[in-house]
Image (cartoon, rainbow, N blue to C red):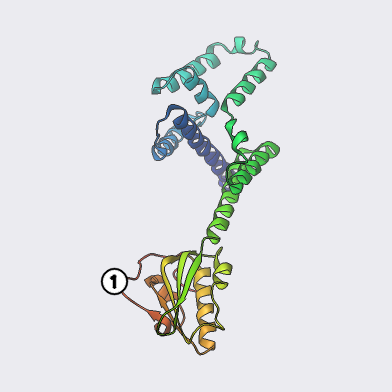
Amino acid sequence: MMYIITPYALILAVIGLTESLMTLTLIDEITETRGKWNKEAIWQWLANTACWFFGAMWGCAMIGQSIINITNGWRGRVSGISAAVFLILLIVFATAYISIIPLAALVGLMFMVVIGTFAWPTIKMINKIPRADAFVIIAVTFTTVYTWDLAIAVISWVVISSLVFAWQKSQNIDSKKYIDKNNITHYELDGPLFFGSVEKFKTLFDIKNDTKEVIIDFANSRVLDHSAIEVINGLTEKYLKTWKVIRLKHLSIDCIKLLKNAEKILDVNILEDPKYRIADDKLA
């Protein structure tokens, strides 16, 4: 049974935690306060775990209910407790009266909650924000509407945002090239080197026309993953095939361990070389 229950449990956990954090962010903006996301997540997990022992239904912070509380002047913890208590009383003692309320009235009420919750200024500023952010907003909105599944919307938001972030970072790598008085070509890299930026990294070098000695300085760059290691290996091999001397400066110890011919192409300086870990610790 666990293999059937586990996927749904994870989906519900993601939905609950996401809505709680979204609610916290929205309330922070309205009340000009700053909530603690880690405490919210931990206590929600503990509360839902306790519900399991008592056979109760799990829950999370709700945007609609929170907006109603805030717009009516409530600010303290008592507002949430009061809402829960009154909800229990209505379900237990006033079910007959609730059933009398027309469904159309509840639909209208939900429409008013949606109208009050939606960030309408977003429509006005959609042409002023970066295109990548506008694309994410529109894509996730349409995904939510057409799938009717908040879990899919959340996953799509994470995937699209990650891809957009990787694309933006891939364009940030650049280099400053100059030749010193000793006829040595210097490349001073600036920006992260990872799977998204390796293609642009290759275009930064002019292997054929460079001088007989080349120094690549990684002081303002950072090697982040296995793809970066591979492209550095490929670049150094191309230089060595043209019988040119190449030196790499300011690489971390982890990078040095993974590079081929490291002892031939690296200038190691224990005091200056950065110390950080990359995404893998061995070559495939």
Kindly identify the residue that appears in the image at 44 percent across and 19 percent down. 74
Q: Is residue 10 above or below residue 247?
A: above
Identify whether 264 is placed above or below 231.
below
Residue 36 placement, left or right of 1: left
Q: Residue at x 52, y 84 (%)?
A: 239
Is 276 placed above or below 1 here? below
- Dot 1, how many residues are within 10 Å of its Cα: few (below 14), some (14-19), or many (20+)? few
Instruction: State the residue lying farthest toward the left.
Output: 271
Q: Is residue 171 visible?
A: yes
Label 1, secondary structure: give it. loop
**Residue holding disc 1:** 271
Q: Position of residue 115 (x, y in %)?
A: 61, 25
Q: Is residue 284 visible?
A: no
In the image, residue 183 above or below residue 178: below
Of the residues shown, which amino acid type is indicated by label 1? Answer: Leu
Most foreground residue, 93 or 283: 283
Q: Position of residue 175 (x, y in %)?
A: 49, 69
Q: Quadrant of residue 47?
A: top left
